[in-house]
Image (spheres, helix red, strand yellow):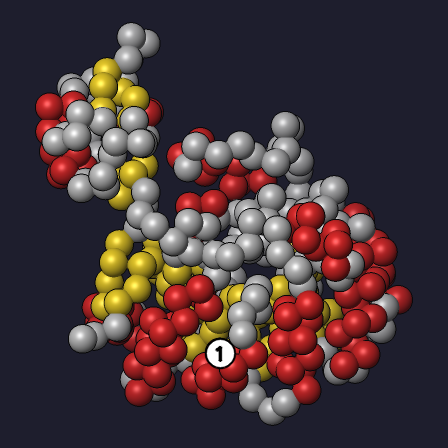
Amino acid sequence: MEQEGRIFDIRRFSVHDGDGIRTTVFFKGCPLRCRWCQNPEGISPDAHLFYFKNKCIGCFTCVSACPEHAISPVDEGGIKIDRTHCNLCMRCTDVCPARALAPDSELVTVREVVERIKADLPFFRYGGGVTISGGEPFSQFQFLRALLQALKKEEIHTTIETSLFTAPSRLQAVLPYLDMVFADVKVLNRETHRKATGVDNNGILENIRTLLTQAGPERIIRTPLIPAFTATEQNIEDIARFISGIDPEVRYELLNYNPLARGKYDLVEQKFCFAENPRPYTKAQMERFYEAARRGGVKNLVVDSVKTQHSF
């Protein structure tokens, strides 16, 4: 049986997920629960039904189509979904004329993904390729490994964006099929990391050590700058000291805060971590973070004034 996996997006013509023009495949499912998650639709490994209220025309075709009677009209217009009775049959999405209802993900085979990616081959000629993101790609390890192996058979450049929250053996199993790794170190302090993400970072830091001490793909360590969570000069300096102590030539990237995730939280019916959405850091503020990284010993900062954190 061919390996299957669940993805929630394939984004084409991306220029901020690695070198060149890239096609980014977003895996569903993540073991972390980062309170600022930029892709909350990628956290759960299961399918979810999206309701776009602004698209709803109030025809209520979905109400009669639902076999579980989980959809009902509301007085103020639109519908409400009883998630306890919805069995995700997605019949409502088939009949909705306005596309106000849609599945958040799809189950695909490795072959299906590769065939869709191959349509973009002309754009990979000048240094582009495929980036696997999420969610956390390692949460679907078998699918990840099979997809990377298939992409390398097609001689396609491969990159992964990962928290490295995975077993060391799984990291070693996919490294031969990767050309580039973007790995997050969000918070160095273990207890603070647990409070912010829901998991311990002991295994993550060991995987970072492995990644930086053996031959293999190119690698860049990243820290997303999240107000009140990761974006302190002390945290950046501590991370920089840790990674530069392993590899003095390590490349380190600080990703500016991205406020655009706020709108996704209504779709997944979750509460956003900020009552008032912060703004991205200014050039002067970013320079202070860069200086903290330099104090920590990092010599090779990856600086991109346009790029903001978006996946982890």
Between 12 and 81, which is closer to the camera in this rendering?
81
User: Does residue 197 lie above or below 55 as drawn?
Assistant: below
Which residue ends up furthest to the front in the rendered image?
84
What kind of residue is marked 1?
A: Arg
Q: Position of residue 175 (x, y in %)?
A: 50, 83
Q: Quadrant of the N terminus?
A: bottom left
Left of 10 or right of it: where is 238? right
Q: Position of residue 222 (x, y in %)?
A: 65, 64
Q: Which residue appears at 81% of the width and 79% of the height?
A: 245
Q: Which residue appears at 53% of the width and 32% of the height?
A: 271
* Total tally of numbered discs in the picture: 1
Left of 22 or right of it: where is 279? right
Q: Which residue appears at 46% of the width and 84% of the height?
A: 173
The residue labelled by disc 1 is 170
Between 88 and 162, which is closer to the camera in this rendering?
88
Q: Position of residue 40 (x, y in %)?
A: 47, 45
Q: Which residue appears at 79% of the width and 72% of the height?
A: 242
Please indicate, yes or no, whether residue 151 appears anywhere in the rendered image: no
Q: Position of residue 128 (x, y in %)?
A: 42, 74
Which residue ends up furthest to the right in the rendered image?
295
Left of 278 or right of it: where is 216? left
